[in-house]
Image (cartoon, rainbow, N blue to C red):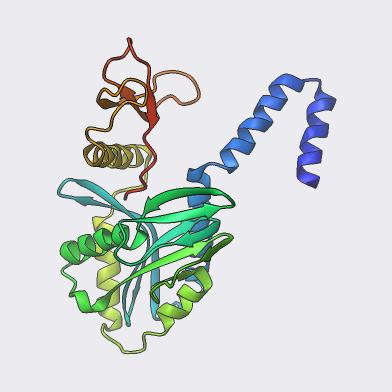
Amino acid sequence: MEIVSSVWASIIETGYLIPGFLAFIFLITFFQSSWFKGKAGEGAVAYLLSRLPKDDYVTLNDVTIPTQDGTTQVDHIVVSIYGVFVVETKNMKGWIFGSVNQRQWTQKIYRHSSKFQNPLHQNYKHVKVLESSLGLPPEITHSLVLFVGDSTFKTQMPSNVTTARAGVRFIQSFETKVLDHDQVTDLVTNISNLRLQKSRATNKAHIRHIESIIEEKTFGKNCPHCGADMVLRESKKGHNAGDAFWGCSRYPKCRGTRGASALNLQ
């Protein structure tokens, strides 16, 4: 509250009430965006993973790997003498409902409910891409989904779906050595060589790949206004420029739209 009051006082003192107010609204919107929340969650988990003993654990964050049909983006990879841990981070609040075999889980905040992709299924692809690309045997790779934020599990979750701090304990619960230190070094080097360089172009290509997956999975979705097929489009103007959305195939006769971010696929 003190920060908000200070910003508001500065806006009034400068005399730029309208531009300052718009900038303030932009900042509030930015900090509440799913992108920022996702990055904040990844940062919190990266910090906790960095505290693992350096001699036995090496953590790589935000790893984008090429695949046969595009790219896949892994939040964190922990390479250790006890195995390779592939970590998916979810920064969410509210009640979380789900099971291992459900395609979609549910987030409930008060009376509002929304669906999101089962993160275990999401992380399964990451694990298999790494196993295939690095020649890893399945018995030494482990999928781990970590929730950060003010969320509560309302259904029984498997041991590899947990909170961030409990996730560190999950990793350290593996005590059988399956790799030596030279093998760990080689794996880290191979992942570093395999990963795509961090850049806006890499992110844009990955986002476009996700959009194509969404388009394929939602093919035939009907326009909410006229019932015609929807097609994936891209905003050209305004603050949403570059964002994907579903638009009616009968445009401009019909201007029905749907958001393209309903699915969270990586």
Nearest the viewer among 8 and 195 is 8
> Splitting the image into 4 quarters, where does residue 131 fall?
bottom left
x, y percent for residue 91: 50, 56
Q: Relative to 102, does residue 78 appear above or below in the rendering? A: below
> Splitting the image into 4 quarters, where does residue 141 fall?
bottom left
> Splitting the image into 4 quarters, where does residue 211 fall?
top left
* Left or right: where 260 falls relative to 193: right
Q: Relative to 198, does residue 92 appear above or below in the rendering? A: below
Q: Residue at x 27, y 63 (%)?
A: 124
x, y percent for residue 203: 35, 41
Q: Residue at x 29, y 49 (%)?
A: 196
* Left or right: where 249 falls relative to 261: left
x, y percent for residue 87: 38, 65
Q: Relative to 7, does residue 68 appear above or below in the rendering? A: below
Nearest the viewer among 261 and 172 is 261
Q: Is residue 264 visible?
A: yes
Furthest residue in direction bottom, as rendered: 176
x, y percent for residue 168: 47, 75
Q: Residue at x 49, y 51 (%)?
A: 39
Q: Is residue 46 visible?
A: no
* Number of on-image labels: 0
Q: Relative to 59, does residue 103 appear above or below in the rendering? A: above
* Left or right: where 47 falls relative to 26: left
